[in-house]
Amino acid sequence: AVKATKRRKVVAVGRWDQPQKDAPLLARTLRRFLARTKGVEVVVIGRGGDEWFGDLACQYEDFLYVGVLPHHEVAEHFTTAQVCIFTSRWEGAPVSGSEALVAGCTIVGPALPGLQSICVAGEFGTIARRRRAVELAKALEDELTAWAGGARDAVRIAQFWRERVTPAPVVDLYLGLRDRESMATAQSAGDVRT
């Protein structure tokens, strides 16, 4: 269930021991963000992050690194969070991004095609101008400001993305396209015979 009112909370999910996810960039971004921003809970989920996130938990009371969690607990974090942040070097269509969106979160990240396509679809996030900690921290601040100003609506976000990424509506879309194509083919064949 999507909560219409969400906490000032940011979530990051990844395999932090994989260079593609760029844990060092996330750590620098969050350090900069947490030093300037109070009252925002930040939760990092996933394996291999102790080296990068362990000291942040000691320095900032609003920060929590939880490591690997069962899927239903990750989903609970998305349900209460406003933003899911990415620092990846590359992303196609990020699964955790889709999970966040259907839970009513928005996205913050670098200018990667998969993330840009999410953000240009509507009021669904903020893309950093450059892939640097200072720019990502600014994008995160801007996105949270959008939430605080009422420019984001968790229920509307979830409704929009559920139609586009959950299995049943996607299957219905493809079946509908197939049926229309079959009808068009049959229509064309009928036109030829007449």
Image (cartoon, rainbow, N blue to C red):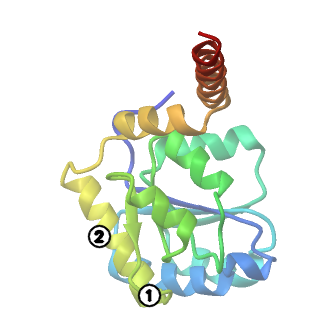
Residue 20 visible, this angle: yes
- Residue drawn at x 46%, y 32% as measured from the top left: 2
* Mark 2 surroundings: few (<14), some (14-19) or many (≥20) residues within 10 A: some
| For residue 29, side relative to residue 24 (left or right) | left
Q: For numbered disc 1, what is the local secondary structure? A: loop
| For residue 151, side relative to residue 77 (left or right) | left
Q: Amino acid at mark 1?
A: Arg
- Residue drawn at x 80%, y 77% as measured from the top left: 18
Q: Amino acid at mark 2?
A: Asp
Q: Give the mark, 1 or 2, whose residue is nearer the N terminus.
A: 1
Q: Is residue 78 above or below residue 144?
A: above
Residue holding disc 1: 130
- Residue drawn at x 28%, y 54% as measured from the top left: 147
Residue 62 visible, this angle: no
- Residue 94: horizontal and vertical position, in percent? 65, 58
Q: Residue furthest left?
A: 149
Q: Is residue 101 above or below residue 91?
A: above
Q: Quadrant of residue 86?
A: bottom right
Q: Is residue 64 above or below residue 31?
A: above
- Residue 45: horizontal and vertical position, in percent? 68, 60
Residue holding disc 2: 142
- Residue 62: horizontal and vertical position, in percent? 47, 66
* Mark 1 surroundings: few (<14), some (14-19) or many (≥20) residues within 10 A: few
Of badges 1 and 2, the one in the foreground is 1
Quadrant of the snapshot with the C terminus = top right
Q: Are marks 1 and 2 in contact (CB under 8 Å)?
A: no
Using the image as rendered, state which of residue 177 and residue 119 is in the foreground.
177
Q: For numbered disc 2, what is the local secondary structure? A: helix
How far apart marks 1 and 2 lie (CA) works out to 14 Å
Q: Quadrant of residue 184?
A: top right
Using the image as rendered, state which of residue 45 and residue 113 is in the foreground.
113
Q: Is residue 40 above or below residue 191?
A: below
